[in-house]
Structure formats: C-alpha cells, structure tokens
Amino acid sequence: MRRIIMMVLRLFLKTPYFFFRIWYCGKKKPVDYEHSYHVIRHVCKKANHAGRVTIDVHGSENIPKNPGFMFFPNHQGLYDVLSIIDSCEVPFAFVIKKEASNMILLKQIVAATGSIAIDRGDLRQSMEVIREVTAQVKQGRNFLIFAEGTRSRKGNVLNDMKGGSFKSATKAKCPIVPVALIDSFRPFDEDSIKPVTVHVYYMKPVLYEEYKDMNTTEIAEMVKARIEETIRRHFENSGFTENTEKTQKNN
C-alpha cells in the first residue's frame, strides 16, 4: 500500500490525466484495443518509475509474432498484471475475478482492454467466459489467465494450477505461453518503498500439436513444472535456492 501511495503522490499532477485517458479508451465504441493497451502500458511504465520498480525481462523473443495466443503466468500478488504489461509490447486482455473487477482503475482497465470478469462461484457464467475467451482467441486476440485461480501468498512458491483454466486454450487450439514471475509480490504486497526488481520470464510457447493429446490437468501440471524449473534456475544462477528465498521471505 505504501508503494501505491508513493506512485500516486509522485505522479500527483498527472494522475487525473492518466485516469481520464484510460477511462476514455474504455468508453469509445468500438474499443480500439491496441491503442488502449499502449496508453495503459505508457501509464504503467510511468507508475513503475515513480514507485521505484524495475522490470527485468527475459525471453521476450518467445512471445509469438502471430496473434491468438494465451499467457499463463504464476500468480504472486496484486502487481502481477502490471509487470507483464510493462514488459510486453504485444496487446493482450485478461480474465479477472469478479470481486477485483470493480476496483477503481482496474474497472477502467478492464473496459479499455476488453478484459473479462469471471464469477468463480457461478459455474454457468464461468462456462460462458471460457466460450467467450475461446472465440476471441480464435479471432486473433491474446489473453492472459492466472491458472492458480488466486494469489499463492507464498512468495515465489506456486499453488497447483487448475486444469479448467486451460479449456479456452485447448478449444482455441492456440499456443500456450508459460510466464514465470519472480518477486512480483514485493511491490504491492510488502509494506515497503525500497527499490525492487521484478523478473519476468517468457518461456517458449507450447503449440497445440504438443499438447493436443493431453488432458487439461496434464497441461496444468506441465505448465506449472516449467515455471517452477525457471524459478529454480533463476535462483541458482543468482546464488540462491528456493529454500533460501523462502527463509528470507519468512524473516
């Protein structure tokens, strides 16, 4: 929360203008998703600079050149989507839980990007979201889904990924791009304004031909394993281990 306050204060004179631009993007019909995304990305970069957050991007060459793919990152904290928007030039929408979709600014971003709110307690609405995402991906839009369903609240340790989160990808027969977020919980979930670096790893896409014979539970396990392996290698190369990271977080 302290970092969010710092971002707002340091951008105090520009905040109303930024908010108006995002709001206006969502009000235009039809919505120009590419323009809206680049407006939001510009604001995101300004906010990150004001909040002393650095994004360290790895593997951006793995982001598909052709539209109609889906990102599946691990889910660490409130900052996750902002870290990916900052690091990704390619526009995408995302699926967000209904409770968060009415928060100030998030509501405007959802409208501007054509993102979709899901009510996890309503099975019929959840199935409608799967069909809608499938249709849009087939039409060439890109989407992001947090397959864990909720924040892990365990730092760089993942929860199990839900197989149902991959149904849109399998129905659209689209590339699945695993994304490993490291320390993405620190900017907003820690009560600190110290400079922080968030690492974003884009892994090689998993093409439909590679997963067509797998069920969604197996796909979820595969994506989780690839993200965990990337996180493990990151800390090994940094001179840390996952256990060291857990200990540091708990302390």
Image (cartoon, rainbow, N blue to C red):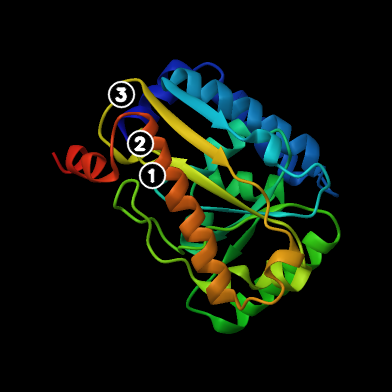
Residue at 38% x, 56% y: name it: 158
Q: Depth check: 150 or 13 in front? A: 150
Q: Residues under labels 2 and 1: Cα distance?
A: 6 Å
Where does label 2 land, which residue?
A: 236
Residue 63 position in % (x across, y down) = 70, 42
Where does label 1 land, which residue?
A: 232
Q: What residue type is labelled 2?
A: Glu
Q: What element carries label 1?
A: helix
Of labels 1 and 3, earlier in sequence is: 3
Residue at 44% x, 49% y: name it: 229
Q: Which amino acid does label 3 sit on?
A: Ile
Quadrant in which the C terminus appears? top left
Q: Is residue 102 visible?
A: no
Q: Are marks 2 and 1 in contact (CB under 8 Å)?
A: yes
Residue 226 appears left or right of 19: left
Q: What element carries label 2?
A: helix
Where does label 3 land, which residue?
A: 193
